[in-house]
Structure formats: structure tokens, C-alpha cells
Amino acid sequence: MESPAGAPNLPGTLDLLILKAVSLGPLHGYGVLLRIEQLSRGGFLIEQGALYPALYRLIHQGLLDSEWGVSENNRRARFYRLTAAGRRRLRSETESWNRVAATMATVLAATAER
Amino acid sequence: MLARIRRWLRAVRRRQEWERDLADELAGHLAERADHWVRRGLTQADAVRRARLELGSREHYREEARTSSGLRWLDEIRQDLRYAWRGMRRSPGFVLVAVSSLALGVGANTVVLSVVDSILFRPLPISRPDEVHFIQTSYSFPSLSFPNFRDLRARNTTFAGMTGFRMSQMAVAAGSETERVWGYLVTGNYFELLGVRPAVGRFFTDAEDQAPLAAPWAVLSHATWRSRFGSDSTVIGRAIPVNGREYTILGVAEPGFSGTEIGFRPELWVPMSMQPEIEGWSWLEDRDSWNTLVLGRLNAGVTLDRAGADLAAIAAELAREFPQVNQDLEIRLVRPGLFGESGRRPVTAFAGGVMALAALVLVAACANLASLFAARVVDRARELAVRMAIGAGKGRVMRQLLTETLALGVIGGGIGWFLAQTLVAGISRWRPVLPIPMQLSVDLSWRVFAAALAATLLAAFGSGLLPARLAIGVDLNRAIKSGTGAPRASRRWSLREGLLAVQVALAAALVTACLASIQGLTRALAIPSPSTDPGVAAVKFDLALTRMTPERGAVFQRHVVEAVARLPSVDLVGLGNSIPLHLDQWHNTVFPIDAVDFGQSAGIAANDFRISPHYLDALRIPLVAGRGFTWHDNAEAPRVAIVNRRFAELALKPGDPIGQRFRYAEKSPPVEVVGLIENFPLESLTEPPRAAIFRPLGQAPTSGTVAVARTTGSAQAVAGEIRRAIRAIDPSVPVFEVGAAKDLVRMVFLPARIATVTLSAFGLLAIMLAVTGVNGMAAYVVTQGTRDAGIRMALGAQPGALVRSLFGRLALIVGTAAASGLVLAVAASRLIRNVVPQGSPNDPMILVTSAGAIALLGLAAAAAPARRAVAIDPLSAVRGD
């Protein structure tokens, strides 16, 4: 099996992944981690400690909202949900990411002219 | 944005909850993850360990989470404060010196500038004060005569209005006794023009102040209403007896308003048309009685220049119309509040000098603080280096130093504010023992305080941070090893040396100024004046404040002389209109016997005394030539006068003055000089000799009277006996200013006393600052030189040589700085002389004394560190710590 990579080393990537994960339904912190692993089919392994500062940053920026609830294993857990601003941000970030990815692909596909 | 701030505020407010949630969340995460590993077949213990390892340092991520939520810097400030507090606790000496330098430097300047502000710069408490100007004549007095005022008021086109006023004594009956109080005579438009409001009742109006002696109305000052009438509003409409007539109280002025001269607190205001009764003689129709002070309010939009031109034109007209009295009359507009320029000019000079000296104290405090901080950073170079080595950022270290500076600033500034507030409140309550009601109301100036504090902190900060930057720049390894930022030590050294030199020089200058002021006061007190003779009792009474006719008044005065002469404790008694150096001085203009020009400016101004027989003897004023007066020198006898030497020089021909003659006016009978006396100060201690004439009471009557009595007993007690004797003759005569003659003339010594107190305080502050500075430097030198000294001692150096080598440079700095301080004082002697006219820093005695004082203080301050240097144990010194 291909060994899993860390999150791509680009600024804002982790934030974008978190927003995407949470956009599919409220999650607690550990759930965000699992969801990203699952969505990337095990391709991305998030450094666990880095997750929480990112979550708090997103809350501070008003992109996420949180609420205490009970996890599927009956533990008290904080659930994160996307705010309206978070949803807008996810949309714009996705667009720009796709643009960058497409451009990168074009650039990298080029072959030497002869 | 707003929502973000709200969230942040919530996090700050509910900090504990926030932390607990974070901890819970991380714990939950670990539990979930451990479950995950248990499901994969690990034991519970292994699973938990694995989960922990994966999550990493919880503390680290918590810290980051805090940063993400904007809570981090709050923590850091708290840390910085705690750190500053620990640092201060570790070096209480540093804190004590820094805080007291700050508090005293800032406090002293705040007090001085607040007082100056309240005297010179604060506008009068009237509406739109910038429109109101004082109308000043070019003559030696600030006032106008009432007819001139009336013409000025009627003819000008640039003023919305003009009001005339005058401070006057009034006799107010209180029970069986009559008391002398000070009030204002004012034209009826006074209150309306100034825009002052009544606290109770109403003011009199211009219409009510027209017919002569038809307006017995009084307006009380708020303070008088409170103290004499218990703030009782039913006093409105009640009558009070003033000078033997009933005056109806119309109203009470608003609390902040105490007349239009700063520091003078009148008790009541009375319409100007009552002047003849209030003062006992009328000058309202006399164009040559210059008794009216005038304020004018400019019309909206009129410039000072235009108003000045308007007044100049009217002055020229008046000079043409009345050439005898108004010759060369010029009229100018000046700031009100201090008798026009007559008061403002000397007060400004005095205040300027005091402010400059206070600023020197502030500079000395700044220098002290600066060198303290510079030293502290050097002392802590190793500590700073260690902190940086273990990962503290440069910014963070700088911020810690800043926090410490600010914390000291808050403490020192707070204490300074408290000191200043206390002092200013004391000054505002202070009523000097004077025959006039003087009291200042000083507001502590926030702006001054803030500026002084900011200046000091900036100095501390600048001198703390600059070296801090250098310290941070040093090689960490070396700093940790040697304990100091060695490579740049020499540069910091010179900064500190410079600061120390500044402190010592300023201390030398301020000590010199302080000694000069003490010398000035001593000299002032020693100036020979008849009025300061301790064996003279003086009692004032005023017949103008009763309704006695002049004839009855003269009889009454004769009765007083007889009654006082009968007192067993009295050796000699005389009466006069005033005594030398008293505030109340009369002036007259005389002309040489062969004069042809009898215009105002051609005459010779002379102080005018009217005296009974034995007045000169009672004051021990010796006759140089001629004779004294007797009761036979009365209205029927030929006109005679006794004059002083200055008068003889100015108004008489050279040669024997006795028998020569002069005139008061073109048509008045000639007066023959029958006696000659020496000059002595008449109005101030520093004046050049003034001309004076003394005339017999029988030929020049006076209603305002001073009884002077020579006694071998206590002048104070005798004055009391005299008062009782006068009361026994007629209790309705107000008797005031009762005491030793020297107490009645206290006013002339007041500036010298204020100067001495102020400059002594400055000198003391500067000395304290310099001593701490020298002491700190000496201690620093010893610390720096310890290892070196240890080696030299181990090699057999004598303690004396050691001390010399350690302190040679320090002594040189202190010596040079002290010398330049003395030079500074001498250079500033004109400034200092504005404050203390009788003292001068140019006196070699003073220079030697203050140089000696500084040298002694330097020695004392360096003594303890020197002892420590000699006691150095060579072994431990060489090893270091």
C-alpha cells in the first residue's frame, strides 16, 4: 500500500480541508480527522495536534461555529459546523484551488519543444 | 469584525471555561483515538500511549489554540507584568530611586506649572473671556481717572462695553463691632458686561448706578455668603450696614467668580456711584485722580489693532482737551487679571525663572532615571542573554523591558500625581497673613502632568531600550560567560558618565540658586526699614468708613493719640496715613518753586506721608537736619514739610534743603522744607531711592490712619491694648491690621519667602537625585572593577591606591560637572535674579559653599561603594561567581 502523505504543504490547505469536511455535516475534532482521511481515501494523514489550532483559528475568523454535544461513542464532544461565511469561503477557496490545480497541471504536462 | 471582537471578549471574559473546554476536547480526542487503537488489537495502556504520541505535546497545541483565538498576547502581558514585578522585588533600591525620581520630578513640575497656569494663563471666569481686555495707561499706574473712563466709554466705537472698578475697603458692622472687609466698587454694567450670573437674587444694573449716592445695593461673593450668612437665601433683600449706611443685599455672585483680579478675593460688590461714601471723599469728578481700573469687551469681529487705534485716537483727544492732566496720555490693551501690565510683568519674570529652574529639576530626574535604566540593562545583560538563549524573541525581551518601564511610570506617576494634588490643594487653601484677602485657586493641570510624565518615561525608556538593543546584539556566549555585554561596555559607560555629569551639574546649579534665594531672603529681612523695627506696634483704623466729618475726625485722632500715650507700656505714639513698605502708599506730584510747566509729566512724583508729631520718633526715623512737627503746625500755620534726601535731590536746589520751598500745583501756596531725613525703602525692597514728603496732619488730613507706638514690651500685646483704647473712644470706628509694624508689611517679603521655599525644595530634589546618581555610579564602578581590583590586591596594591584607581575618573566627572554647574548658575544669574532680586549666584561665598556642598555630597555618596571596594576578597573576586 502506498504510504499516506501528510497534508499538502501549502498554506491554507488544512483550513480548506477542514471546511470541506465540516461542510458535509457537523463533526467533532476527531471526526474531522477521520473524515479527511476517509475523503482522501487515506491519502492525507493530518498531524493531529495541528488540527485544533486550525479549528480555533477558523472559529475566531467566524468561519466555523461550535456546539457541545455527544459523540457516537457517548462522549461529550464539541461539534463544528460551517457558518454562512464559512460556506462562502469554502466556495471561493475551492474555485481558486481548482484554478491553481488546473494551471499547475497544464504547466507540468508541457513537454520540451523540439 | 464586530462579531470577532465579541467572540474574543467572550473568550477573555470566560477564560476558565474556555480553557476547560479546550482540555475536555483534547481529552475526548485522545479517548476516541485510544478506542481506535484498541479496536486494532492494542492493549488499553498501549492504545492510550499511542494516541498521546500521535497528538503530540498537548501544551504546545493549547498554546497555539490560544494564539489562534487571540488570547495569547493577553497572557504575555500578564507574564510581562509578573516578570516586571519579580524584577522590581529583587531590586527594591532601584525601584525606590526610580519611583521617587519620577514622582518628585513630575510632581514638582506639575505643581509649578499648575500654579503658573492659574495665575498667568487661565482666562478669567467670565463669558467669552478672549473678548475682554484690560485698558492700561502709559503712566506708572494701570488705572484711569473716572472722568477719563467716562469719556473713553462714551466715545469709543470698537467696544461693546467698558466697565470701571476699584478695590476698596469697607466697614461692615457685625454685631457691636465694625469689621473692615475688602470689596469692589463697580460701575453698574460690570456683571452684565462680564457675563457673570447670580447664584441667588440679582445684580444691580447700569440704570441703578447713575444718580450719586442713590444705589445702596450690595452683591455678596459666594464665599462670603457661605461663611458669613450660612448660604441662607433669605438674606436677599436684607440690609447690612456698610460704612454706617444700610445696603440692601440684592444677590450673590456665582461660586467660581471672585472679581477680576487674580488672587484677590473681594467679599462684596457695591455700585460705583456710592464711591464718595465708601471711600470718604469723592474722586468721581476729578480728572486727575487715577483710581479706576477699566475692562472693555470688544465688539464681535473687531481686531486688537483696530481697537488700539480707536483708543489711541481718543487718548490724543483727551490729551488735547485736558493738557494739564492728560499730557502724553497713551492707552493700550493688555491681558486682564493682574492689574494690567503692572502686575503681569513682574509676575511673568518671577514665574519664568521658577519654571526654568523646575524644568532643570525635571531634566535632572530624567537623567537620573535614564542612567538607572542604562545601568539596569547592563547589569542584566547576562539574564537577558540567557532568556534569549532559551528562546525568548528579541521583541519579547524588549517588550518586557518596556513593561517594566511603564509599570514604574504608573507607580511613580501615581505617587507624583498624589503629591502634586496634595500640594496644589494646600496652595489653594493657603491664605497668606496679609492685610488684603489673597487666595489662589489652582487647578492641577492634567496636560502638564501628562507631558512631564511622558518626558520622564521617554527618557527612561530611551535610555533603557537603547542599551537593551545593544545588549541583545551581544554575543550570547560571551555575555553568559562574563556577565556583562563586554564588547560595548565602554560605549555605555560614556552614556552613563554623560548622564551623571548632567545630574551633578544641574544639582550644582540648583543648589547655587537655592543658596542665592536664602541669601536674598536674609538680605531682604536685614534691609533697614523703620517698619521692621520689632519695638513698634501698629494699628490701622479708617475714619472714611464711618460717617465722621473731617473736623470730628481730626478731634478723634487727637483723642486716640492722648489715650494711647496714657498706656503705661507705650513710650511714644504717633499717627500717619501709612507706614513705609505698607501696601497702601499715597503719591503726590510736586513742582519746584520756580516751575513754569505744571503739566502732569513735568512734576516730580513723591510718596506722600501725612503724620502727627512723634510719628518719626516712634518709628525711630532720625532727622538729619531741621525740626520735627508739633501740633502747632496746623491749617492756620505756614505750610511745612519734612523731605527725604532723594526728594531734596530732585525738587530742591543744591545746598541746604532747610528753608527751601516747593509747590503742589500752580495756584497752591508754597511749602517750606523744615526737616530732612535719610532715604529708606518705601514700596519694595529693591526699588531705587524714591522721593518722599511728610506733611503735618493738621495741614494734610487723612482719614485712613495708622497709629504707631514704640514700646519696650511685646509689640503684639501693645497693639491689642491700642485697639481696646480706640474702641473705648468710639466702637463704631473699624480697627484692623493690629500687630507689630513688621507684620503689617509682610507683603514685601512674600516673594522672597516664596522663592526661598520653592528654590530650597528644588535644591533638595536636585541633591537627592545627584546623590543617588553618584552612588549608583560608584557602585557600578566597583562591580565592574571587582575582578581587576582583586588581582591588584592579590599582587599587593594598597587600598588607597585601589580606591584612587577606581574612583579617579568618577571624581573627575563629578568635579568637572560641578564646576560647569556653577558656571551655568552664573550664566543664568539674570534669570535667578528675577526670582530672588536680593540674592545673586555671582557671590563668591555662594559659589564656594555650593561647590563644597556638592563635593561633600559626592564623597558621601561614594563612601559606601568605596568601603566595599577596599573590602574585596581577592580570591573570590578573581574567581568571579
Image (cartoon, rainbow, N blue to C red):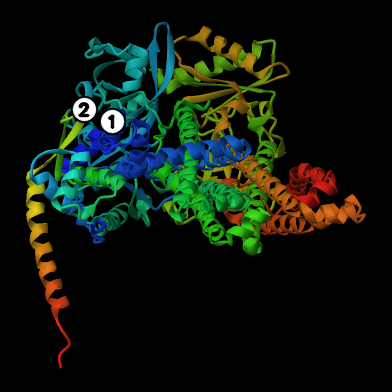
Q: In the figure, residue A94 lies in which quadrant?
A: bottom left
Residue B753 visible in image:
no
**Height in image: B470 above or below B705?**
below
Instruction: Determine which of the numbered discs, if any, sits on residue B218 in the image.
Output: none
| Pick the front one: B221 or B454 | B454
**Height in image: B100 above or below B470?**
above
Left or right: where does residue B812 sit relative to residue B552?
right
Left or right: where does residue B804 sit relative to residue B692?
right
Judge the density around disc 1: few (<14), some (14-19), many (≥20) Cα neighbours within 10 Å: some
Q: In the figure, residue B70 lies in which quadrant?
A: top left
> Disc 1 on helix, strand or loop?
helix
Question: Horizontal and vertical percent for residue A72?
Answer: 15, 31
Instruction: Determine which of the numbered discs, if any, sits on residue B24 in the image.
Output: 1
> Disc 2 on helix, strand or loop?
strand
Label 2 sits on what residue type?
Arg
Contact, CB < 8 Å: mark 2 with mark 1?
yes
Label 1 sits on what residue type?
Asp
Left or right: where does residue B25 sit relative to residue B76?
left
Give me the chain letter of mark 1: B
Question: Horizontal and vertical percent for residue B765?
Answer: 61, 41
Q: Residue under label 2, please give it.
A: A76
Judge the density around disc 2: few (<14), some (14-19), many (≥20) Cα neighbours within 10 Å: some
